[in-house]
Structure formats: structure tokens, C-alpha cells
Amino acid sequence: MPPIEQIILSAAVLTLLSVFASKLSDRLSVPALLVFLGIGMLAGSEGIGKIAFSDPWLAKSIGIVALIFIIFSGGINTNWKRVRPILFPGFVLSTLGVLLTAIIVGASAVLLLKFSLIEGMLLGSIVSSTDVAAVFTILRSKKTSMKGNLTPLLELESGSNDPMSVFLTIGFIRILMQHNVAVVNLLPMFVLDMGMGALVGFLMAQLIITIINWLKLEYSGLYPVLTMSLVLLTYAIAAILKGNGFLAVYVVGLVMSNHDFVQKKSIMRFHDGIAWLMQIMMFLTLGLLVFPSHIIPVIGSGLLIAFVLIFLARPISMFICLFPFKFDWVEKTMISWVGLRGAVPIILATFPLLSHVPQAEMIFNIVFFVVITSVLVQGASIHAVAQWLKVAVPGDSTRVYPLEFERTEGIDASLNDLIVPYNSAAAGKRIFELNVPIKCLIVLISREDKFIIPDGSMIIEGGDVLLVLANDQDFAALNAGVRSRRSI
């Protein structure tokens, strides 16, 4: 065991390199997740770092903890109003879509790699879900969004389909290792796993919101600590009750995103940072775990499975699942292409290693190669494909203001920005000449990258961004007035 100082030094250097590399990856249009994996591999025993690491149990444990916080962050940062219209298609993609993908990849593994049926289904199950970290990172790092409900649907699917993949992986490992378990036995397990996970998540979300609002901590820095412990508690309770802990954590985040509670913005910002730290830690660990020399012999097999997954399994399952819904073929094609695989399949590939499943090492190496191929091919081309299919729209650039407003219980108001169109009837008028509701306050104006504290005599110009403190009704009234066009 190396000295603790050496471990701390290695962890600090690798984390710093990952942060700096993420900036470089944006400029080179290379997914940051692939860079994190590469740094981990370079630091490994077969790389220049010569760090010896071959503990699948530790890698799995780190991965599970990391996924808990990544999935929770994805849930709490999901805009409920955006995902509510596509809840049902998202549910279909995250369950039936995962199952169909596993079946197609599993059948291909039987035909192409001479796996047994259950071994093939195990491989298919491991790579069947899109990765929440990969999808969220790539979709939210680009300066482009997608039209309609494409972006919220993809984020909802990636955040909610990991539990199905985990369930199938554990189920088929059990069938392989316990010969008295049949595939049909997975059905009641599925109902308990998903049902209990969703129930625990919903109940814990109500409890967490109540605790946060009731506790009134003296130090604001303790609120993120409180939520971290409660999120971990949620996962543990769901797992003990034979439910799906990842689904429970995602439901907690999703429900919390739709409610107001004390320190909400700071909690969300903290967990966003924790999610990034967990992604870096997880990908570095998995990069250290893999041996590049073991990947080379399975490149052919990995390419075959990657081809099947990207060009057959994902598109076929998506078109089948979305057939009843109002998505055209272009939108379905785009959804099919955003089938990014990331750390989740690699973490799941450690499960067979720990269970000593036949073909476990080959499965792990194939999965690792498939993930690299998926992130490199699909992740690096999402922006271009979206433009080619004409589903790309300008993304919302997050505007940073020099003040914040925390909406809490008992305050019927929130801080929103309002862009003044150049042809607005309000342009050229003073603030006191506008029909501003009595309880509506324009607290700040952003004009040409400068911030101005307004008074009633200030003239509004087209292109101004007004930062408005008001309730929803008053803000809507002001918005309607500002959006109205001037008469010609």
C-alpha cells in the first residue's frame, strides 16, 4: 500500500488534468468523458503513470456511489414542465426500449460471437441503456439544443433507463449462476424492483422536502451535506426493500425539481459540481481498471457488437417504441443516434467479474471497447447530425446576473428575465410609462453586456434584458405588454 501522501498527490494531479482536459475537449469537439477515460488509461499500470489497480469490487463500489449522485443531479436539474408532456414515451423508451436493445444485441452475440443465449443476453443487458452522465454532459455542453421535445425526451430517457439495465444484468447473472432460475422468474422481480424503487423515491422526496423546509439550519453550508446524506439514505432504503435504488434516487431528484424548498439554487449548484466530480472520479477509476493489451484481442468482436448496437439495435428499438407517438422519422432518427453509452455499462461489466461468470473478462473488454466507440462516434457527431437532420435550434445561453433570488415557502414571487424585442411597443418608453403591475419590480437591466439599476425615468431599448421580480400572473401580464409590437 503506497503512502497516503502519494495517493493524495496522484488523485489531485489526475483530477486537475481532467478539469484542464475538459476545456481542451470542448475546443477539439472531443467528448470530455472519453478524455477522462484516456487519462485513467494513461495513468494505469500499462500507461506512463504505472498506477497498479485491478480491484473490480472497489471500481464497482466507486461507480455505484458516483452514479447515485450523477442520477440525482440529473433528476433535480430536469425541468418538470418540459418533461411532463413526454413522460409516457420516456417511460416506454426506458423500459421496453432497453429490453428490445438487449434482445437484439444478445441475439447478435449468439450468432456472431458464439455466446450461449444467456451469456448473449447478459452482454446485451449490460450495454442496453444510454448513459445519464454521457448524455447530460454532451447535450448540455453544446451551444445547440434540439427542437420540440427531443432534448427533454433524451434527458428523461437517459436518466431513467439505467435501473432497467441494472435489473436485467443482475437477473441474467442470477440465471447463469443459479440453474434453477428461469427467465419467467424475472417478471415478479421486475415488478418489485421498479415498483418499490419508484415508491421509495416518491415518499423520500416528500420527506426530504419537508425536512429541508422544517429544519432551518443555522449554517447554509450544511444544506448540501443534509441532501447528500438523505440521497444516500434513499438508495440504501430502496435496496434493502428489494427495490431499485437508482430509480428511487432519480425520482427523488425529479420530484424535488418541481417543488420549492430552502436553499434550492445552492443545493442544485452544489450537486451539479458533485456530479462532475463523480464523473471524473468514475471514469478515471474505470480507465485505471482496464488493461489496453486486453482490449486489442477483442477489437473485432467489439466492432461487431458496436455496429449492431449503434446501427441496428438502437434504431430498431427506438422506432418500435415510438411508433404510437407523434414523432416523425427525422426525430426518431435523431433519438436513435443519441444512444450514448458511458460509464454505466462498464460498471455493470464488473458485476460478472465479481460473480465469476463464464466469459466475464471477455464481456468486460468488449463492453469497454463498445463504450469508447459509442462515445467517440456518436458523442462527437451529435451536433453535426442534429444540424444535418435540421432538428438543431440555437441553445439558451445561460445569463449570469450579479444577484440571485431564492424562492422559498411563503414568497409568491420569482426572478425571471424578459427580453425586449426590437419591434416592441415598450421600446423607447420610460419605465413609468409602461403598464407594470403594482407588485411587479424590474430590479436590473442587462444592456450590451452591462448591468444597469433602473429607475422610473429610464428609457427601455430594444434588445434589453429585464430582470423582473414578480409572481407568475404579474410576470405574464408584463411579458404580454413588452412582447406586443409597436403600431406602424
Image (cartoon, rainbow, N blue to C red):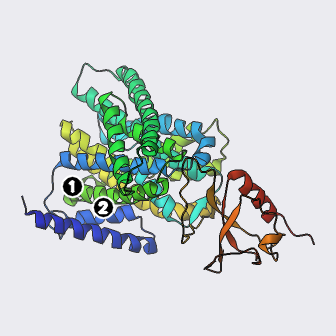
Q: Sequence-wise, which precedes: disc 2 or disc 1?
A: 2
Q: Residue drawn 50% across and 60% down?
A: 140
Q: Quadrant of residue 101?
A: top left
Whether 33 is drawn above or below 175: the answer is below
Q: Secondary structure at mark 2?
A: helix
> In the picture provided, is 116 more to the left or to the right than 156?
left
Q: Residue drawn 32% across and 50% down?
A: 66
Q: Secondary structure at mark 1?
A: helix
Q: Quadrant of residue 268?
A: bottom left
Which mark is drawn over residue 289?
A: 1
Identify residue for label 2: 37
Name the amino acid type tagged 2.
Leu
| Residue 294, position as x, y percentages in the image | 20, 55
Whether 481 is drawn above or below 102: the answer is below
Name the amino acid type tagged 1.
Leu
Residue 411 appearing in the image? yes
| Residue 115, position as x, y percentages in the image | 29, 37
